[in-house]
Every structure is written in structure tokens, then in C-alpha cells.
Amino acid sequence: MAEEPVVIVAAVNGGAQQSRDGATVPVTLEEIVEEAVRCEAAGATVLHFHGRNAEGRNTGDPAVYNEIIRRVRKETGLLIQTTNGIGYRVDPKTGEHFFPPDEERLALLNLKETPDYYGAMTVSIDFYDPEGGFPEEASFRNSGRFLKETLKTVYGRGSTIEFEIPHVSALHRLQRYLSEEGVDPSSPYIALLMPIIPSFVPDHRTFLYLQEEAKRMYPNAIRNHCGGGHEAVEAITLALALGFECIRVGFEQSIYLADGSVARHNHEQVEQAVQIARTFGRRPATPAEAVKILQLDRGPK
């Protein structure tokens, strides 16, 4: 029997993760490009990245994203997905953690170097993920305006949005906004990411309930899953067992391998994901296959 393709997403740096314990998190242009090349060779289909400034901190500067996308496309055949949240900041006066405003985040929808598809958080949440570089809660506001403009812009150009789903209520909010835009919840180009991290889905039991409700409400959705910290390998294994179309690995959420050791580079996690996928009769999707799986060949609306 022929192996079925699975889209492997390499989320290589996140908006807060820093190099630690022997893991090298790519932050400069050259480091991100080099990591993309290694991840592609290991079996990744998609690069998900967060832009960083000269100090290694997250940035929403379109010029940074444009140059990274341009270089990654020159050096690899990977599909590219950009961040929707950029990463948290710290108020110098109060020490409070917060996320960038709508204007900075929405600017990433109109880059000169257009990514292949996008991500979008669906609800406001107190973001907390120590393994991903968020040691304290950061208020992550996701306004109706952000969601509406993302829907109009991305679906208008025929691309795909991967909606981040932290809990069941998010599924219902998303359905309301989709309906307002005239999008049928059974559309095959709706993509859902349901990560196991502390402020999202806290454990596998909760995830199983969430994905069942997602399947009921969005029967043809493109499903993706990842886990934080030491649960990362369990998460992708469970997703493969459930027949998910995509799995996500990388230092954004975890620096660990299955045996508990620390990966030096992202591509080691990709190699491991490929091995696990093969035990389920799956193989890495080619970019051409991923375009079809992710519904990126629909054309402008």
C-alpha cells in the first residue's frame, strides 16, 4: 500500500524562544536560511518563522520578513507560513508582558514577498508557555477587526489561514466570523491548529475532545497539531494516529527529542518526525502535494 503524504511544518524559532541548553535557535537572516535548508533536507515541507531584529528580539518590520522569505525561496523549495502574533513585548515602565497591536500584525498580510499561507489566532487569551519562551502570562488580544481583515485579505487572494484553536469556544467564535464572511464551515480550505501548551490545550484528554468538536463543526478541515516541551513527540504521534493532514515540530514550542535529550538544531526534530510518520504509513509531502493538501491552488476569490 502506498504511503500517504503528511505536511511537516518546521516552526524554527517562535517570537520569544532563545538558544539554551545546547539548542541553537535561529534569529539572524543567515541562521534562519541555513535552518530552512537543513529542515528541507530532513523532510520538512513548510517553514514557519518569526522575524527577529538585530538584538534577536521579535519584530513586525515588513522589511525583515520580506528579506527572509526572499532568501528562503532562493535557497529552498519550502512553502512559507508567517506568524500572526509576532511575539510578546515587555513594557519598560511596568514590566507587563503584551503582544503587538493590530496595525503591526495586520501589516504582515501585505508583504511584498507574499507567504504561501497564514496563521491567525481566533480568540483573546492570556498566553503562557514557559517551554516556548513565555515564562509569564502575556495578554494576547485578538480583536474582531483583526480576524475580519485577515479573513477578507487572505481568502480574497485565494490563500489559506491556519486558525489557532486554544479551546472549544474558539471554534464557535470562528464559525460566527466565517458565517459573516459567507464562508461555509464545511469548506475544505479551513485549517485548524490545536497545540498542547499550557494556555491552550493543557493535555491529551482535552485535545481529544477539542478535535472531536472541531471535526463535527468543520468536517473537511485541514488539521494540524503540535505540543510544547516534552509533550511534543507525543503530540505529533497522536496526530498521525488520528490521520491529521499536518504535523508541526520545531523550537518554537519544544527543544526536545523523543528520548528527552535536547536537539541542537530544528532539523533533528524533523528527522524524528519523518521516522514516526513512517510507522503510520505516512511520508513527507512534497511541496506540490502540500499545495493541494493546504488548498493553495484555489485562485483569487
Image (cartoon, grey):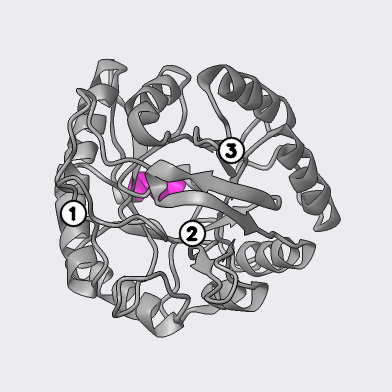
| Residue in front for this viewpoint, 265 or 220 | 265
Residue 63, above or below 180: below
- Residue 67's spot in the image, x, y percent? 31, 80
Q: Main secondary structure of the magenta part?
A: helix
Which disc number belongs to residue 200?
A: 3
The three-letter amino acid code for the residue at tag 2 is Tyr
Q: What numbered label is drawn on residue 137? A: none
Amino acid residing under circle 1: Thr
Q: Of label 2 and label 1, which has the lower sequence position?
A: 1
Quadrant housing the C terminus: bottom right
142 lies left or right of 276: right
In this view, 298 is above or below 22: below
Note whether 111 is above or below 286 in the view shown.
Answer: below
The residue at 40%/47% (across/down) is 132
Query: In this view of the protein, can residue 98 be seen by the observer?
Result: no
Please name whichever residue, 11 or 255, is drawn nearer the observer in this view of the structure: 255
- Note whether residue 75 is visible: yes
Mark 1 surroundings within 10 Å by alpha-carbon count, few (fewer than 14), some (14 through 19), many (20 or more): many
Left or right: 27, with 89 as reference point: left
**Residue 22, position in %: x, y?**
14, 47
Q: Which residue is mark 2?
A: 117
What residue is shown at x 54% (from left), y 62% (from top)? Answer: 85
Residue plotted at (46% across, 42% down): 293
Where does label 1 land, which residue?
A: 24
289 falls in the magenta region: yes
Q: Marks 2 and 3: which is nearer the front?
A: 3
Residue span colored magenta? 288-292
